[in-house]
Amino acid sequence: MFNLFYVATATAGEQPNSMAAILSMVLPLVILFAVMYFLFIRPQNKEQKRVAAMLNDIAVGDSVVTTGGFYGVVLDVTDDDVIVEFGNNKNCRIPMRKSAIAEVEKADAATA
């Protein structure tokens, strides 16, 4: 790969090309950053965009699963909050943040 040992032990009489020495030290760091970007940063950004799009597309009648594992149906939607009805009990309506919703299943057009 790169001869970093040669760069580190070069004597004063035979100095290596300074551009090659700098490149041989910087190139592995650039490659490491590129690998980290494509393995960690890019997938995380794509997941954040997917979750944001899912939360923005919530509509009345959608079935949702909360981060606590509760299943419910959306009754009302505001900018940051939703009102979710849980179970068959029509009196169990709980307002919650959109960020507390883990999954959304869109309501069918036939049932809506």
Image: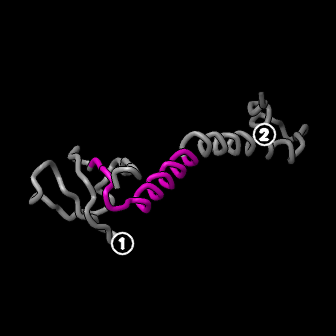
Outermost residue to the top? 1
Q: How crowded is mark 2: few (under 14 residues within 10 Å), some or many (20 or more)?
A: some
Give, as a three-letter code, the residue at label 1: Asp
Query: Which of the labelled discs sits on residue 25, or is there none?
Result: none
* Residue 66 position within the rendered picture, expressed as x and y whole percent measured from the top left: 26, 50
Q: Residue at point 35% right, 47% down?
A: 103
Give, as a three-letter code, the residue at label 2: Ser
Splitting the image into 4 quarters, where does residue 79 fall? Answer: bottom left
Q: Please say which color scheme the image uses.
A: one colour
Does the magenta segment cover residue 42?
A: yes
Q: Which SS type dominates the magenta stretch?
A: helix
Does the magenta segment cover residue 58?
A: yes
Instruction: Identify the magenta region.
Output: 41-65
Q: Residue at point 83% right, 37% down?
A: 11
Q: Which of 34 and 5 is in front in this view?
A: 34
* Residue 5 position within the rendered picture, expressed as x and y whole percent measured from the top left: 74, 30
Q: Residue at point 75% right, 42% down?
A: 27
**Does residue 25 sit above or below 74 in this rendering?**
above
Splitting the image into 4 quarters, where does residue 21 fall? Answer: top right
| Residue assigned mark 1 | 79
Q: Residue at point 78% right, 39% down?
A: 24
* Residue 50 position within the rendered picture, expressed as x and y whole percent measured from the top left: 49, 52
Q: As drawn, is 31 to the left or to the right of 105?
A: right
Q: Residues within 10 Å of mark 1 (few under 14, many from 20)?
A: few
Q: In which quarter of the image is the N terminus?
A: top right
| Residue assigned mark 2 | 24
Of badges 1 and 2, nearer the viewer stands 1
- CA distance separating discs 1 and 2: 52 Å
Splitting the image into 4 quarters, where does residue 13 fall? Answer: top right
